[in-house]
Image: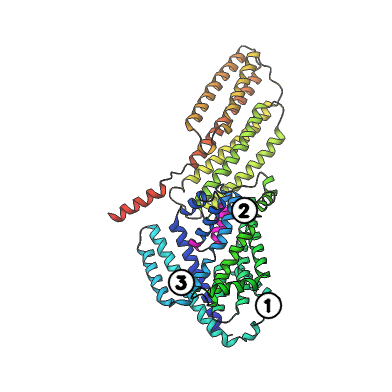
Amino acid sequence: MTWEIISGLVGGVGMFILGMTLMTDGLKIAAGKALRKILEHSTHTRYRALSSGFLITSLVQSSSAVTVATIGFVNAGLLKLSQSVWVIYGSNVGTTMTGWLVAFLGFHINIQLMALPAIGVGMFLKLLSNHERRAAYGLALTGFGVLFLGIDILKSTFAGLEQHIDLQMLSGTGITELLMFLGLGFVMTLLMQSSSAAMALTLTAAGSGLIPLELAAAMVIGSNLGTTSTAVIAAIGATSNAKRVAASHVIFNLVTGAVAILTLPLWLWLVQEVSGFIEGTSHTATLLAIFHTVFNVLGVLLMWAFTARMVTYLEQRFVEADVDEANPRYLDATMVDTPDLAHQALGLELARVADLVSTMAKDAISTESSQSQRLRRDHQVVIRLVENIVKFINALQKVELPDYLAPKFILALASARYFVEVAELAHKVDVAQSAEPAKLTQELHSDINEFRKHAVSALEIDNYDILHCDVALGEKVAHDMDIEYERLKTHLLRQGALGNVPVRQVVSNVELLKNTERLVLEMLKGITTLSDFSQIPESNETDEEEVLEEKETS
């Protein structure tokens, strides 16, 4: 094999992947929040979720990107596992559109006549447009042209490769050869992290006559199995939800791949029979595109009756991470590149912290027997959980954030700091309250118990929508707590001055009351700050576009 052929293969694949990356990135930016809205509002039934997965993957031309985004939506609480599974199924069918693009445009038109103008026009749009969405369309158009130049290079390379390879060596279609080429397709996808690139390589090789149809079909099945590697990699060290979505992706592809390879002769015969009735579909690359679509649709039909049981099974798996409360349940690295999702998930994770420290605070105030051991453990859980949250926010600061989101993450840090303070105060209150009983008057005992009840009532955050807290209500509660504290402090000091209460106990009880009040106030600050963090005006994107339009018009 000559250096020209090696460089052609490497360069063709590299150009294809570059084009695919540019096109996917451009289309994702151009789509804006539309992808989120489709997944959030169009997945309530299995039919709609299946259609959404198909539509989005066909649009952005990357099942891997959709799989990772789906994991992020599940973590952010926008999708349930039962919905995400059907999005994954639809995504697997949607990724077959790449094969159709390669088969029809790559082998039936003059590629350079189409690709070069696309690159030129796309770059002009990208460089000259001040509008983000139009620039993104330009980037996608450029990627489209680069992608097909890569296909053209691969076609030329494979045409020359016939002279250097004994095609008789590739004529066998026994089980050994099929498994070998299935493994080759899997390894290519694993190494390139792009089933589309593996498909393009397979289709151009088969279309050039280098690989027989049966072996090329086995490679297609292998590349389909290889797509699971992206989901598995994304789930490493991720949340339980991410692992469950990745597992559903692996199960679907394993079942589909196993059935397809075992019944391969039947499906190839059916594909060839069907293509005989459709003009222009007899080309090998087109037959492979049909086969790729058919066996993925077959996979959806096979899994239809078993999906509910699979979801139930997966929900019982990967529970170890959920047992350790210090592990984030909504945050993982898959969301960092999607700030909107990261914002949503961060709000849910902070709400978890709020619920945890609220329980700590109520237990510390309302129980006179010591809770120190459990509170110390919960305090460590809060510290570790907040450390994970801070790491996540630091990772977000390294990506480009929308203007309306960038200031919000400072509020997330402030909210986390308030909650840590609540956990520390809960421990102090518990230690003071479980000490030697104070020698107080009956009236003081009654007043302090009422104060404690009032504090516990103020901490009943279950009565609030934590992410959309009523700020006015919080301010009223804080004001009432301050008035009650000042009244009790004055009463204690007066009783101490009269000699009815020992001075040492006056000081310790004033300190206890102050810490109890601070505990409630810090909790309220944390909740209201978290609520402020969670509020994102729906009109942001529209407003930004209108401003840009006005600037361009003027």
The structure residue drawn at horizontal position 65% and vertical position 57%, both measured from the top left corner, is 247
- Residue type for callout 1: Glu
Q: Nearer the viewer, residue 74 or 216?
A: 216
Query: Does the rendering let one see residue 194?
Result: no
Q: Secondary structure at mark 3?
A: helix
Can you tell which mark lies on residue 177?
1
The structure residue drawn at horizontal position 54% and vertical position 81%, both measured from the top left corner, is 208
Q: Nearer the viewer, residue 375 or 508?
A: 375
Spatial distance from mark 3 to mark 2, Cα to Cα?
Answer: 33 Å
User: What is the magenta segment's predominant secondary structure?
Assistant: helix
Residue 146, how many percent across, how many down?
46, 71
Label 3 sits on residue = 146
Q: Is residue 64 magenta?
A: yes
Direction from residue 551 to residue 392 in the image, left or right:
right
Query: Does the rendering let one see residue 516?
Result: yes
Quadrant (top left/top right/bottom left/bottom right) for the N terminus = bottom right
Magenta region, residue range: 58-72
Label 2 sits on residue = 242
- Residue type for callout 3: Val
